[in-house]
Amino acid sequence: LNVSGGEVRAGYIKFLSSKNNSTYRQTGGLVTLGGPNTEQGYFDLASNGKTARLDLDGGVLEAWKLYGGANAEFRADGGTLRAGKRIRNGNVSMFNPFMYDFGSAKLGAKGLRFDTAGVDVNVTQGFANKDGVEGLFEKVGGGTLTLESAAHTVSKTVVSGGTLKYANASGSFATTLVITNGAVFSMAGEEVAVLTLNGLKVDNGRIELDPGDVITVTGAVDLKDLSLSFTSAPAEAQN
């Protein structure tokens, strides 16, 4: 299935082929899954147990749930993944985790723009570089995206809207972190106490921490208009 432009609306997309190597590729346009008062709105690559791939290389894919399976691969190089609002009786009810269980999720140089669009979602899927290139993950839009994956190793992670929270105490967040446009990166309220980054650049951004949290940067640091906030005052400030 290939989408290169225009607008497509559907209840859901579900791979049922008995053959391997089924692929959904989007290079443009807007694909919106789901609608009000429905349990649909999902993208399912897991049901048939065959090898399958979702390539998001342009345009916008909006859904309220994506799930793969050990034989499914997610790849992005220039596309936007938007969290759709699941509306029940006039109320927004999000499904969490929003994205999970893909065998791999690999990002290219143009990367993935993850738009939370004013809602809060959790993702248990880890992200890595695609084919040896330096991949890009960008969090945009209002709301909070919480990454719970054991490994987030894409080369660059940009937070340019809302809040990006990392919440895996035993995980790896081996990336160069860029915070800009008043956005927030948070470790607050989580069990993550020590985080090691490959690099850190802030241009008008905020970092939220719990007292005692430590961020270690092994590479370049460039800080401009950085603010820090804590869930409570550090012990030294309480004396």
Image (cartoon, rainbow, N blue to C red):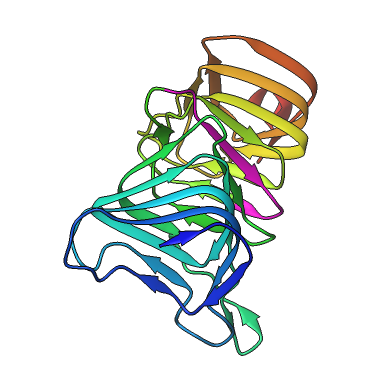
Quadrant assignment for the N terminus: bottom left
Q: Nearer the viewer, residue 49 or 24?
A: 24
Magenta-colored span: 133-144
Q: Nearer the viewer, residue 31 or 117?
A: 31
- In the picture, measured across the screen, residue 232 lies left or right of residue 70, that is right
Rendered view: 209 above or below 3: above
Q: Position of residue 232 (x, y in %)?
A: 67, 39
Residue 128: image location, x then y, percent: 40, 33
- Residue 23 as seen in the image, left or right of residue 156: left
In the displayed structure, 109 sits above or below 103; it is: above
Residue drawn at point x = 48 percent, y = 74 percent: 41
**Looking at the rendering, which quadrant does residue 52 occupy?**
bottom left
Position in image of residue 23 (x %, y %): 34, 55
Instruction: Write the residue at 57% across / 81% down.
Output: 35
Side of 52 relative to 57 (left or right): left
Vertical position of residue 221 compared to residue 125: above or below: above
Q: Quadrant of residue 37?
A: bottom right
Task: Work out whether residue 213 or residue 142 is closer to the camera in this orientation and state it.
Answer: 142
Residue found at x 64% / y 82%: 91
Which residue is painted at 51% across and 20% down in the image?
Answer: 197
